[in-house]
Amino acid sequence: MVDISGPVDISGDYFVGEDDVDSLLSGDDDDWALSGPRRRRMPGGSAGQALQRRAAQQAVATRMAQSGAVVREHAYTKARTWVLPFDSVTNVAAGGTATITSNPQMPFRGRRLSVLGSVAGFFLLNSIIVGNQPQFAALNAAGPADAFAPTAFGTDLQMDTAQANTNVSLQVTNISAAPLRFAAFIFGEAVA
């Protein structure tokens, strides 16, 4: 993941190139390091070299920040349980089939599907698809959605991980005689 802060302007004397960074970090300046607007001599030895390297890195960071563009990369730092909602928004016609898609904004791995209890008995679950990967062991085989009602147990799933902006889809069929709205959640782990 990359964060970009400030205006992106890398022109002029403020830009620090690879050669500048290498010379600052290598200590080619005869054990001298930058410290504010003046230069001072650093003590010798490994402690002095560590101080010199830290001062050089700080000088590079300061010069880069002055250029107006600060780019830093960071990894995902926390994982927790999230929910991925599914809602048909409109009613699914009696006997009709609908594909309901949700799009997680961070890597997400589903662990449990929970279908709204008041409609679970009126729908068949035809498929769960992460990206283009079906999550059922058999293709073209529908099962009752009430197997995933809120009170159901033993329905733990280990779905494929959906990367950020990868669609997760449920395909359902209304088996009742009236149009109904379908709603469900997939509970799982996501990292941010």
Image (tube, grey):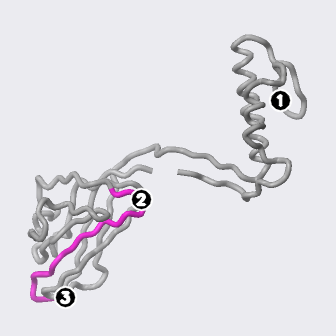
Q: Is residue 170 magenta?
A: yes
Residue to which mark 2 is pinned: 164
Q: Earlier in the sequence, mark 2 or mark 1?
A: 1
Q: Quadrant of residue 187?
A: bottom left
Of the pair 138 and 99, the residue shown nearer to us: 138
Q: Which residues, given as a range, are shown in magenta?
A: 162-178
Could you say whether the residue bearing mark 1 is in a helix, strand or loop? strand
Question: Left of 90 or right of it: where is 103?
Answer: right
- Nearer mark to the viewer, of 1 and 3: 1
Residue 112, given in percent of the width and then of the height, sits at: 22, 56
Residue at image coords 83%, 29%: 35
Of the pair 116 and 124, the residue shown nearer to us: 124
Amino acid at pointer 2: Ala
Residue to which mark 3 is pinned: 93
Q: Which mark is residue 140?
A: none
CA gap between label 3 and label 2 equals 31 Å
- Nearer mark to the viewer, of 3 and 2: 2
Question: Would you place residue 2 above or below residue 20 in this image?
Answer: below
Residue to which mark 1 is pinned: 34
Question: Left of 71 or right of it: where is 169?
Answer: left
Residue at image coords 71%, 27%: 54
Residue at image coords 24%, 68%: 184
Q: Earlier in the sequence, mark 1 or mark 3?
A: 1
Amino acid at pointer 1: Leu
Residue found farthest to the top: 45
